[in-house]
Image (spheres, rainbow, N blue to C red):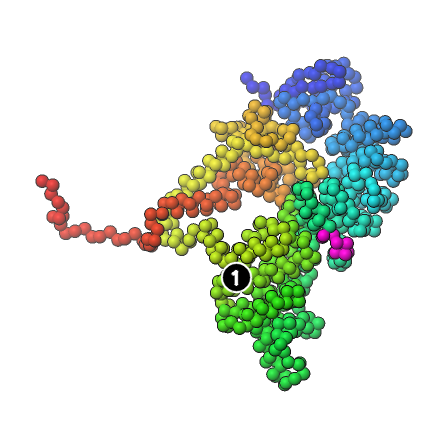
Amino acid sequence: MPPPADIVKVAIEWPDAFPKLMEIDQKKPLSAIIKEVCEGWSLGSHEHFALQLADGTRYYITEKNRNDIKNGSILRLTTSPSLSASQLHERIQSSSMDAKLEALKDLASASRDITFAQEFINLDGISLLTQMVESGTDFGDLLSFTLTAFVELMDHGIVSWDTFSVAFIKKIASYVNKSAMDAAVLQRSLAILESMVLNSQDLYQKVAQEITIGQLIPHLQCTDQDIQTYTVAVINALFLKAPEEKRQEMAHILAQKQLRSIILSNIIRSNQPINDEMAHQLYVLQVLTFNLLEDRMMTKMDPQDQAQRDIIFELRRIAFDVECDSNNSGSIEKRKSMYTRDYKKLGFINHVNPAVDFTQIPPGMLALDNMLYFAKHHQDAYIRMVLENSSREDKHECPFGRSSIELTKMLCEILRVGELPSENCHDFHPMFFTHDRSFEEFFCICIQLLNKTWKEMRATSEDFNKVMQVVREQIMRTLTHKPNSLDQFKSRLQNMSYTEILKIRQSERMNQEDFQSRPIVELREKIQPEIMELIKQQRLNRLCEGTCFKKTNNRRKPDKYWYCRLSPNHKVLHYGDLEESPQGEVPFDSLQDKLPVVEMKAVVTGKDCPHMKEKGALKQSKEWLELAFSVLYESDEYLNFMAPDKHEYCVWTDGLNALLGKEMTSEYTKADMDTLLSMEMKLRLLDLENIQIPEAPPPIPKEPSNYDFVYDCN
């Protein structure tokens, strides 16, 4: 007979003793189990002992996490968290440097455990560490492990960042400002400054007074990518927390210090590959840089503002310089007529007062800024475009003004100008780090693309929205290739012609007009259940292969993994913890825990998941919520998942819902259904190519008056 569900078989270690094999009753108080273990080795004062996992994590077993103990786990008997915290609190104050160093190493390791951290913090341990840092007597490894322990303790979120003194901030900042500093100390100091800025507006003010961009720049020129990553993270944090009025000033300083070119040469174009964390920080910097455009994007033009109107006059002057007369010559009516004619050639909607065109937000004044930049920095292309369109027939001219306004709005949407950076995104584009005015250059390339596409489509003013849709598709498809430079982006766009877009569209989707007749719709409805069953089998097969999931989401802590897979008969979920990410499938005998499918009650996602409701879960980003799901089963227990990506999330939620007999509703199911259904329909209708299918079946003829026409075989 299998053991009861509440009984767990484990091995327990104790130094210099033979390990014990014993059965733990999970219904029994943990203190009683520890007492029993202590008595087995004749150890007194059982209240001074605790159980720990014997793996690399060395986490304490508590009443809260005891259900994580699995059959076959190896535990170790050790001193209790309170006693360990008290001993380490005393040891790190030792007068012997060697003893103090060993104590700090132990503290840095033990502080990863929240149970120990709580006990050490209760002894005012954080204050002791800050005093040690402020004293300035520790250097090298002593200081490195002190800061490591501090970072680990603060990562638990038990103590508020607002409690630290200016002296402590100055000391940490001094380690960053020094030209020659131990790499480990520098890395921890940068991590502390980033957390201070992000977690407290008051500390942001103090850190900003101590740290300048000029002092951070040299750290980007080193070869240690971890230090480079934390440096960019600190710059991002200062940028993010800066008041609106100071961000433009900070951007100006960054430009003066040539931050962009330093990042380009020392990070993006360096020999070492960019890791995920660095990619995330570069993405954040890209987003924050583009968000500086939000103010202009949301600013309406004042038609009465002469300075703003002068920009429009400048656009006219550059385009029609040879045609312009002196403003003082001719009558007012003649000049007004001349302006109206030129504004029409420039493609504005309002020919009389084009300033009205820029009252729409977004893109507001940002569109006018882009147009002026194009006219001044790409003057030949600008003049050629305006004159070329003004000489075409009225119905085929591409309106430069209207196109620029709509294109600017589109580019802001594509680059998500005004939105906060995502917590889990690594989508930075190297080409935006190759030019100080990358958005304006991006616009200049795209407006020329728009003009080219307009000609290729032989578009008229009625086709304006269609042209914009094609241009958007051209830009989006080219951006997916992550061009390394703006020139490369421009070159790829040249190959993404309107004809190429039509070919891509034709290969990606079927001709909708041919598939709207009733017989075809009925055929689709008949095939759909077969395709859905095929998708269901694919999802279940993927669950049988299994997936490795992460347990922790803190970027500074080493990842913990666990694996889950469905049995081939689709009756049991097998799962268990792993030391590291596996290279292939994990065999069933390595997964100690089981969950029968018949015991599963429901699958919940996002904010409804138990692990998203726990303390600190509110800090989780939208992306984590979109990847979280849980299986609820009997006795109100639950199995929590955090999918590695959106695809695995959809596969598992679909598969688990299929096991429960529920509908598969993920976006991947819809996409797979569309793809497979399209392929199946094309195959079945292959023989009917170029044959028009009637909307309704042909009528059945009337019965004949006699059947004498039937051939008599005799």
258 drawn magenta: yes
Please identify the dominant SS of the magenta region. Answer: helix
Of the 4 image quadrants, the one containing the N terminus is top right
Q: Is residue 121 above or below residue 432?
A: above
Looking at the picture, tell me which residue is in the foreground, 569 or 660.
569
Residue at (60% x, 36% y) in the render: 641
Q: Is residue 351 above or below residue 134?
A: below
Left or right position of 682 against 699: right
**Location of residue 662 in the rendering, given as x and y in whole percent from the top left corner:** 49, 38
179 drawn magenta: no
Residue at (61% x, 58% y) in the render: 411
| Residue at the bottom extreme, as displayed | 331
Left or right position of 435 against 393: right
Looking at the picture, tell me which residue is in the foreground, 222 or 246.
222
Number of numbered discs overlaid on the protein picture: 1
Of the 4 image quadrants, the one containing the C terminus is top left
Q: Secondary structure at mark 1?
A: helix
Q: Write down the quadrant of residue 415 in the picture.
A: bottom right
Left or right position of 683 against 502: left
- Mark 1 crowd level (few <14, some 14–19, many ≥20, 10 Å Cα): many
Residue at (49% x, 45% y) in the render: 671
Looking at the rendered structure, the kind of residue marked 1 is Thr
Q: Which residue is mark 1?
A: 453
Residues in magenta, as a range: 253-261
Q: Is residue 25 visible?
A: no
Q: Is residue 518 visible?
A: yes
